[in-house]
Amino acid sequence: MYKVIKSNCKGIIQMEKELLFITVIGQDRKGIVAKISNYLYENEINIEDISQKIIGTYFVMMMLVDISGSTKCHDDACGHQRINKGHR
């Protein structure tokens, strides 16, 4: 997790972000982006940047997200289990 603090020219802190990378790799199928984006929205997690690609039959996506606005648990196990439930 990375913390980003922005300040203006007077040195006043404007915003603090808690940034995480999410990496998704798996067989390509409909609804992957929608499922993950919906999970993030429901947990008040902001997508800062996103990159995705189809390589052969595989879907590859990287997201940079800001979890500072969320009060949910965000360790690897919490998010991983919920997003992947029933999709193996």
Image (spheres, rainbow, N blue to C red):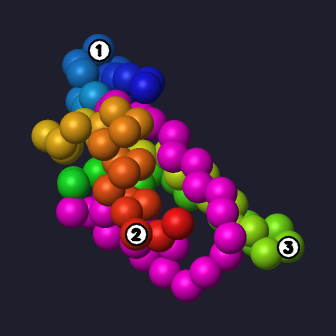
Can residue 8 be seen here? The reply is: no
Nearer the N terminus, badge 2 or badge 3?
A: 3
Nearer the N terminus, badge 1 or badge 3?
A: 1
Secondary structure, mark 1, is loop
Mark 1: few/some/many CA within 10 Å (<14, 14-19, 20+): few
Q: Which range of residues does the magenta coloring cover?
A: 17-42
Residue at figure coordinates x 37%, y 39% from the top left:
77
Percent across and percent down for residue 20 are: 45, 36
Percent across and percent down for residue 36 are: 41, 64
Q: Which mark is residue 11?
A: 1
The residue that mark 3 highlights is: 56
Residue at figure coordinates x 31%, y 63% from the top left:
39
Mark 1 → mark 3, Cα distance in angstroms: 49 Å
Nearer the N terminus, badge 1 or badge 2?
A: 1
Q: Which amino acid does label 3 sit on?
A: Gly
Compare residues 35 and 14 and report the one nearer the observer: 35
